[in-house]
């Protein structure tokens, strides 16, 4: 019963905050101002899901592409509550989730359509050219404590280099990574319920590392490799690069997640 009450209380608070923040978001948009409300909502929702976030390093807040490791769908709440980020996310979102994501000017991609990669990179480049802070999860799926290869395709959005635009590797370090991880066959709705009912806190440290100049990297593949190497170096030993670990089950590396 206590778990059910906890779930009801947390979910009610999230929905109530959404009902307050959405009109304020549209009001800011009406006057042509950049809205702070998506960031505030994501931060509030993250706390309701139990996240306790600590930020280390100095995040760039404009003209930047963040490239974090991808532990769980909770990563979006953690990063989005810490910085004013636009997210690169999967195109198959539907209904209210799609609408809410659109409020934050998300960039949508379909990894099943390789022919669309050029256009998707162009969309991402447009956000960066506007001076936005954009968050891309280059692994392409949630992977828990494993760090998968960073897919270089969308790093093409940085070439030719845009003046002043940097790539900032970001480390997401959960104190209890196996509790936070969303991999394998766990249903998304069951995962959401698990965190709504879970007692206590989930501590996560977000480390914003030294930015990388795409012009110095030279091309998208080298840039992706440099960003991944920086993330791996910034993680504790409890996380493992996939080439240093035993092969993961297919379901673990193919679980659907925000990309």
Image (spheres, helix red, strand yellow):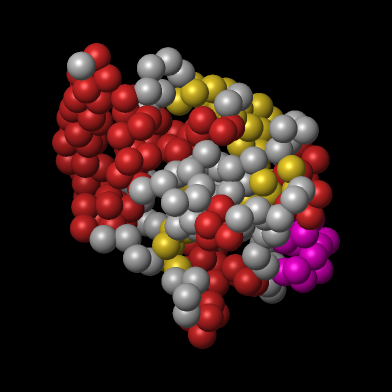
Query: Which quadrant is the N terminus positioned in?
Result: top left
Residue farthest bottom in this picture: 115
Q: Is residue 131 visible?
A: no
Numbered-mark total:
0
Looking at the image, residue 3 sits to the left or right of residue 204; the answer is: left
Whole-percent x and y of residue 159? 68, 72
Q: Nearer the viewer, residue 55 or 113?
A: 113
Our reading of the magenta stretch's main secondary structure is: helix
Query: Where 197 sits versus 80, above or below?
Result: above
Whole-percent x and y of residue 88? 47, 58
Looking at the image, residue 171 sits to the left or right of residue 213; the answer is: left
- The answer to whether residue 6 is magenta is no
Name the residue: 23% across, 29% down: 11
Whole-percent x and y of residue 209? 72, 39
Name the residue: 68% across, 49% down: 147
Residue 170, quarter of picture: top right
Q: Nearer the viewer, residue 27 or 243?
A: 243
Name the residue: 16% across, 36% down: 19
Residue 23, quarter of picture: top left
Whole-percent x and y of residue 236? 75, 31
User: Which stretch appears magenta?
Assistant: 212-229
Q: Is residue 43 visible?
A: yes
- The answer to whether residue 224 is magenta is yes
Name the residue: 40% across, 57% down: 106
């Amino acid at each position: 019963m206590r778990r059910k009450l906890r779930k009801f209380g947390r979910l009610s608070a999230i929905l109530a905050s959404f009902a307050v923040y959405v009109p304020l978001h549209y009001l800011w948009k009406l006057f042509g101002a950049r809205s702070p409300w998506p960031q505030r909502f994501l931060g509030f929702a993250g706390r309701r899901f139990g996240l306790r976030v600590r930020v280390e390093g100095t995040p760039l807040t404009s003209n930047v592409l963040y490239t974090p490791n991808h532990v769980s769908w909770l990563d979006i709440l953690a990063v989005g509550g810490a910085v004013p980020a636009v997210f690169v996310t999967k195109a198959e979102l539907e209904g209210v989730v799609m609408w809410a994501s659109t409020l934050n000017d998300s960039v949508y991609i379909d990894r099943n359509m390789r022919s669309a990669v050029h256009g998707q990179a162009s969309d991402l480049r447009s956000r960066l050219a506007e001076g936005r802070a954009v968050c891309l999860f280059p692994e392409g799926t949630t992977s828990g404590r494993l760090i998968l290869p960073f897919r270089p395709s969308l790093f093409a959005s940085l070439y030719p280099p845009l003046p002043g635009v940097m790539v900032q590797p970001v480390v997401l370090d959960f104190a209890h990574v196996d509790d936070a991880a969303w991999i394998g066959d766990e249903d998304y709705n069951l995962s959401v319920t698990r965190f709504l009912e879970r007692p206590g806190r989930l501590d996560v440290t977000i480390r914003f590392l030294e930015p990388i100049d795409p012009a110095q990297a030279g091309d998208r593949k080298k840039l992706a490799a440099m960003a991944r190497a920086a993330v791996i170096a910034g993680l504790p030993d409890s996380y493992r690069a996939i080439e240093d670990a035993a092969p993961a089950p297919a379901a673990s590396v193919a679980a659907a997640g925000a990309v």
